[in-house]
Amino acid sequence: MKKIILGFLTIGILLSCSSDDDNEFNTNEQNFLVFGHFYGECFGEKCVETFKLTDTSLFEDTVDDYNGENAEFVELEHDLFKQVKNITDFFPNQLLNQNETVFGCPDCTDGGGLFIQYSENGNLKRWRIDQVKDNVPDYLHIFIDKVNEKIALINE
């Protein structure tokens, strides 16, 4: 009888443990776009801004870690989601076919950089993109503008 009770207790404890599946940044989530900017020679909360857009919600990273490894996302107001959800319309599909993960030299000359992650059907890709358009392919220019526009809109 003691072995049965011990077995149930063990199973109960194991099932009650939380896992990384609770993390909003978990890449097991099927479809999302993470977008943000970073500036190394900058002081204050606005130097690193990272957001996660899903099909239904918008989240902000509270850690402000532009490596994306330690992100902790909190959901933002639905009105903000409605204002930025069309950013995916400007995502350049050419980017998905690139082997490069860094375009230009993000923040090398204190011009800042963009951090982008794109997950579709569980396939995750990441890029760092220079904010200086002369340093990146033309097909990224409109997307750079839209990312910066949406970040500014969220931060109003």
Image (cartoon, rainbow, N blue to C red):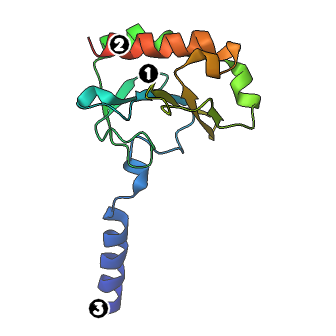
Q: Residue at x 48, y 31 (%)?
A: 107
Query: In x, y percent, where is residue 120?
Result: 63, 32
Q: Is residue 1 visible?
A: no
**Rendered view: 26 above or below 37:** below
Name which quarter of the figure residue 142 lies in. top right
Label 1 amino acid?
A: Thr
Going from N to C along the chain, the mark reached first, 3 or 2, is: 3
Going from N to C along the chain, the mark reached first, 2 or 1, is: 1
**Dot 1 corresponds to which residue?**
56
Residue extending furthest toward the bottom = 2
**Dot 2 corresponds to which residue?**
152
Secondary structure category for the residue under label 2: helix
The quadrant the C terminus occupies is top left
Secondary structure category for the residue under label 3: helix
Query: In x, y percent, where is residue 52?
Result: 43, 29
Q: Residue at x 54, y 45 (%)?
A: 28
Label 2 amino acid?
A: Ala
Name which quarter of the figure residue 47 lies in. top left
Q: Residues within 10 Å of mark 3 (few under 14, many from 20)?
A: few
Q: Please report contact status of discs 2 and 1: CB closer than 8 Å, yes or no.
A: no
Query: In x, y percent, where is residue 111?
Result: 46, 24
**Rendered view: 22 above or below 113:** below
Secondary structure category for the residue under label 1: loop
Image check: 91 left or right of 29? right
Q: Residue at x 44, y 21 (%)?
A: 56
The label shown at residue 2 is 3
